[in-house]
Image (cartoon, rainbow, N blue to C red):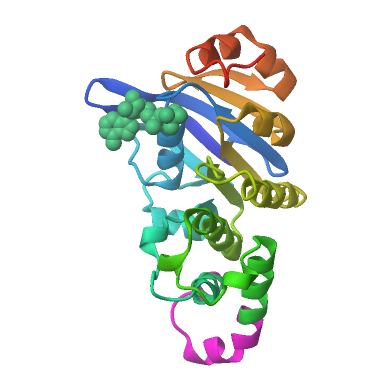
Amino acid sequence: MLQTQDLTIRFGGHVAVNAVTCAFEPGTLTAIVGPNGAGKTTYFNLISGQLKVSAGSVQLDGRDLSNLPPSARTKAGLGRAFQLTNLFPNLSVLENVRLAVQARLHDGLNLWSIWSDQRELTRRAHEILESVALADKQHMTVASLPHGDQRKLEVALLMALDPKVYMFDEPTAGMSHDEAPVILNLIRQLKQDKTKIILLVEHKMDVVRELADRIIVLTNGSLVADGEPAEVIASPVVQEAYLGVTNEEAVS
Ligand SMILES: Nc1ncnc2c1ncn2[C@@H]1O[C@H](COP(=O)(O)OP(=O)(O)OP(=O)(O)O)[C@@H](O)[C@H]1O
């Protein structure tokens, strides 16, 4: 189980995430919604360790991760989509995925095991690339991939790490109509694995409606609603929160 306890961060006088206490169970996809600037991405950054908490804690399976850097949290099982800028832009798509699979399988450099596992690494990397519909682009360099494919690769790398917790922050943002379903299908597939915890920050309410088992709502950094999707979507607090966005995104 992933838990945040009184999780808080202040930027100067502004409390961007305000004492958020929440637990996330395996086998559950929780959507995190709220108006622009509500603190959703900041909440993710506190969980993954990109930002240091001002107060409160993050725990995974009873282990306090609050003082660990992002890399140690990844190792502990927290999976946040990679920033492609951190990767090897001049290596191929396949090589990048193989490296991520390898990073999961090996703790440090062990030439013998790397050598003996080549075939398995390549097999798993191919399998992942098939699932994100990037198999036909496996030999392209990451730098030359179009934006939508780069987003797919981010998900592929996350899958290669096989984390306990999948954190998706607007995974289809900037994708074309044709590309988004690939990512959504993938998240649907991941949901079948009842050992995984999935967190999804998403503005598109049709996506939230379809995928979420539970919705939590942040407004001004505070957790203001938490429950079954239908119930939360119908709640006055969500109706109100979304009236501040656009008519298109407003929940009806
Ligand atoms: N590094 C930072 N320094 C100062 N203020 C920050 C920082 N990061 C976030 N904030 C502020 O914290 C608040 C929450 O921002 P955040 O990006 O988490 O909101 P969000 O809910 O993800 O919004 P959106 O839906 O637009 O992505 C905003 O007021 C933002 O300006």
For the point 53% across and 77% down, the residue is: 139
The vertical placement of 88 against 166, above or below, is below
Q: Quadrant of the N terminus?
A: top right
Q: Nearer the viewer, residue 12 or 55?
A: 12
Residue 21 or 36: which is nearer the viewer? 36
Q: Position of residue 29 (x, y in %)?
A: 67, 39
Residue 60 appears in the figure: no
Left or right of 37? Residue 193 is: right
From what the image shows, is residue 202 above or below residue 99?
above
Q: In the image, is residue 84 part of the stretch drawn in magenta? A: no
Q: Is residue 117 magenta?
A: yes
Ligand 1 shown in quarter: top left
> Can you say which quadrant of the picture contains the C terminus?
top right
Extent of the magenta region: 103-121
> Where 17 sits versus 161, above or below?
above
Q: Residue at x 47, y 40 (%)?
A: 58
Q: Is residue 141 left or right of residue 163?
A: left
Number of numbered tags placed on the structure image: 0
Residue 163 pos. (x, y %): 59, 57
Q: Nearer the viewer, residue 131 or 4?
A: 131
Secondary structure mostly seen in the magenta stretch? helix
Residue 22 lies in quadrant: top right
- Residue positioned 54% across, 70% down in the render: 97
- Outermost residue toward the left? 12
Residue displayed at 55% across by 30% down: 203
Side (left or right) of 121 relative to 56: right
Q: Can residue 85 be spotted in the picture?
A: yes
Residue 56: horizontal and vertical position, in percent? 41, 32
Q: Is residue 106 above or below residue 182?
A: below
x, y percentage for residue 108?
44, 77
